[in-house]
Amino acid sequence: MTDTIDPSAPVAPKLPIPKLDFPLVTRREAADLLTQAGYPIVHRTLEQWNLPRFRIGQRVAYRVEDLFAAAQQRIDKSCYAYGDPVPGVRLGPPDAAA
């Protein structure tokens, strides 16, 4: 496998970053935001991502910008970006198919 992206391949969709009143979200809130944006993920998966973490009491919080940047980077590196989408997997918001 090469690390070059085929310019004729379909472009990976960009995740919309939501505007929130507070820039930090808990792990569960982060998973919900990413899922709503079209990147289905569970909160336990975020533990494995190498993101800057903040402690709020006993909970871990992430900056929304860091979270969406990491998710977008994963989408861009996915096989979808190389023109070989995974069968049965649709990236994008849930209402994009309508």
Image: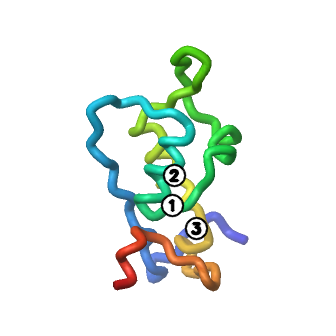
Q: CA distance from mark 3 to mark 1?
A: 24 Å
Q: CA distance from mark 2 to mark 3?
A: 20 Å
Secondary structure state at the residue bearing disc 1: loop
The label on residue 4 is: 3
Q: Nearer the viewer, residue 71 or 88?
A: 88
Placement of 35 over or under 29, stated as above or below: below
- Looking at the rendered image, the quarter that the N terminus falls into is bottom right
The residue tagged 2 is 71
- For badge 3, the amino acid type reads Thr
Q: Nearer the viewer, residue 7 or 94?
A: 94
Secondary structure state at the residue bearing disc 2: helix
Q: Position of residue 10 (x, y in %)?
A: 45, 79
The residue tagged 1 is 39
Q: Position of residue 91 (x, y in %)?
A: 49, 71
- Looking at the rendered image, the quarter that the C terminus falls into is bottom left
For the residue carrying disc 2, how many other residues have a C-alpha within 10 Å: few (<14), some (14-19), or many (20+)? some
Task: Of the two numbered discs 2 and 3 on the same chain, state the one appearing first in sequence.
Answer: 3
- For badge 2, the amino acid type reads Ala
